Image (cartoon, rainbow, N blue to C red):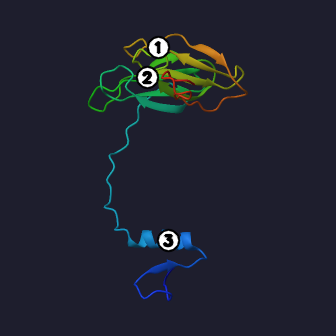
């Protein structure tokens, strides 16, 4: 709650010490104008190779449109659903991705400008698989790299700040 400070003659305010962050947050919320209602389009379903436990969005075929890639647990695959440019996704193209895929990440791992896929393999192989993009949205056979017990997520970034992306 806000309390007028008796120590000054100016119109300054102090937050009470107890619960000051809560009071500040509540004051900000109460003072904020109400947001306009948002209307969402009806949901659309696009089939992959079920069950898909992971999804990522990126321009897989370099046509400027965001495509969808899913990681499929029991099918041991990824599915690529290409965007036709008007927001519709095409039929899935499925690629083997190792064993029991639970997470995927997209990034240009080999520096050719195409988004490659890294997928976790969690059941018994305890690895991550790299699938290189051929430039048109097709992928090479997976190459597995051993990691710790049951990887459940994967992240990509330039961790050593030298330019290339690491897993």
Residue with the mark numbered 1: 139
* Camera-nearest label, 1 or 2: 1
Q: Earlier in the sequence, mark 2 or mark 3?
A: 3
Please report the residue visible at 53 percent of the width from the left and 10 percent of the height from the top: 141
Residue with the mark numbered 2: 80
**Relative to the observer, which residue lies in front, 148 or 24?**
24
Residue with the mark numbered 3: 24
Residue 13 visible somewhere in the drawing: yes
Q: Position of residue 158 (x, y in %)?
A: 52, 27
Label 2 crowding class (10 Å Cα cut-off): few <14, some 14-19, many 20+?
many
**Relative to the observer, which residue lies in front, 28 or 90?**
28
* Camera-nearest label, 2 or 3: 3
**Relative to the observer, which residue lies in front, 37 or 9?**
9
Q: CA distance from mark 2 to mark 3?
A: 46 Å
Q: CA distance from mark 3 to mark 1?
A: 52 Å
Q: Are marks 3 and 1 in contact (CB under 8 Å)?
A: no
Please report the residue visible at 55 percent of the width from the left and 70 percent of the height from the top: 22
Q: Earlier in the sequence, mark 3 or mark 1?
A: 3
Q: Earlier in the sequence, mark 1 or mark 2?
A: 2
Q: CA distance from mark 1 to mark 2?
A: 10 Å
Left or right of residue 59, residue 77 in this image: right
Under circle 2, the secondary element is strand
Residue 50 visible somewhere in the drawing: no
**Rendered image: mark on residue 16:** none
Label 3 crowding class (10 Å Cα cut-off): few <14, some 14-19, many 20+?
some
Left or right of residue 28, residue 104 in this image: right
Q: Position of residue 87 (x, y in %)?
A: 30, 33
Q: Is residue 95 above or below residue 6?
A: above
Q: Position of residue 97 (x, y in %)?
A: 56, 18
């Amino acid at each position: 709650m806000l309390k007028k400070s008796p120590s000054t003659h100016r119109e300054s305010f102090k937050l009470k010490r107890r619960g000051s962050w809560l009071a500040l947050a509540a004051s900000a919320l109460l003072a904020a104008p109400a947001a306009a209602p948002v209307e969402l389009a009806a949901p659309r379903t696009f089939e992959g190779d079920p069950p898909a436990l992971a999804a990522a969005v990126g321009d897989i075929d370099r046509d400027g449109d965001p495509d969808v890639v899913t990681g499929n647990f029991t099918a041991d695959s990824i599915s690529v659903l290409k965007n036709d440019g008007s927001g519709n996704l095409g039929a899935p193209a499925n690629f083997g991705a190792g064993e029991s895929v639970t997470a995927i990440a997209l990034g240009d791992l080999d520096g050719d400008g195409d988004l490659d896929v890294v997928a976790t393999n969690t059941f018994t192989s305890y690895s991550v698989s790299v699938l290189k993009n051929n430039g048109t949205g097709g992928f090479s056979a997976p190459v597995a790299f051993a990691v710790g017990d049951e990887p459940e997520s994967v992240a990509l970034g330039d961790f050593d700040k030298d330019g290339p992306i690491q897993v």
